[in-house]
Image (tube, rainbow, N blue to C red):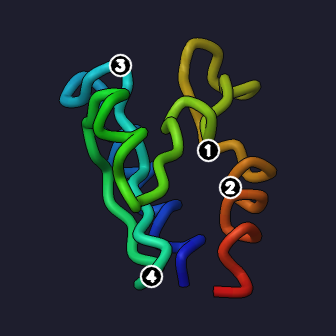
Amino acid sequence: MLKDKIEALLEEYLEAPEAWSDNVMIEVNPESVDARLAEVDDEAIETSPLDYWAVMDLLQMSVSNPGEWEIDREALDELAASYLNQ
């Protein structure tokens, strides 16, 4: 399921955010509905048949642990829902 895959990718990112650039993206292949973490430039995104979602758009500041990021469940649900009919 895509939602589970993206959640795992976000958890991977949160384990070592310093390993990624500031513009790390979730890359989704709309044909296979497979996903991975990717570092791509804006020009590649514009010409790619793949979909890209900014990791930071899927995270929020933690209420229970100030200064830490956590998965934004609502944003994750919205992203996954956009692929339900595929």
53 sits to left or right of 25:
right
Task: Estimate how packed mark 3 is, as few (under 14), some (14 to 19) or many (20 or more) residues with alpha carbons within 10 Å.
Answer: few
Marks 4 and 1 sit apart, C-alpha to C-alpha, by 25 Å
Marks 2 and 3 sit apart, C-alpha to C-alpha, by 19 Å
* Image depth: mark 2 or mark 4 in front: 4
Q: Residue at x 39, y 75 (%)?
A: 34
Q: Which residue is drawn at 66% across and 74% down?
A: 83
Say what amino acid the circle numbered 4 marks: Glu
Identify the residue under disc 4. 31
* Image depth: mark 1 or mark 2 in front: 2
Between 80 and 19, which is closer to the camera in this rendering?
80
Figure quadrant of the N terminus: bottom right
Task: Give residue 28's position: percent from left, percent from top.
Answer: 44, 63
Q: Which residue is drawn at 62% across and 34% down?
A: 57
* Image depth: mark 4 or mark 1 in front: 4
The numbered disc on residue 76 is 2
Marks 4 and 3 sit apart, C-alpha to C-alpha, by 27 Å
Earlier in the chain: of badge 1 and badge 2, it is 1
Say what amino acid the circle numbered 1 marks: Ile
Earlier in the chain: of badge 4 and badge 1, it is 4
Task: Give residue 44's position: percent from left, percent from top.
Answer: 29, 39
Task: Using the image, determine if residue 68 lies above or below residue 59.
Answer: above
Task: Using the image, determine if residue 20 lies above or below residue 35.
Answer: above
The numbered disc on residue 22 is 3
The numbered disc on residue 71 is 1
Are the residues flagged by discs 1 and 2 in contact, CB closer than 8 Å? yes
Say what amino acid the circle numbered 2 marks: Leu
Earlier in the chain: of badge 2 and badge 4, it is 4
Between 44 and 61, which is closer to the camera in this rendering?
44
Earlier in the chain: of badge 4 and badge 3, it is 3
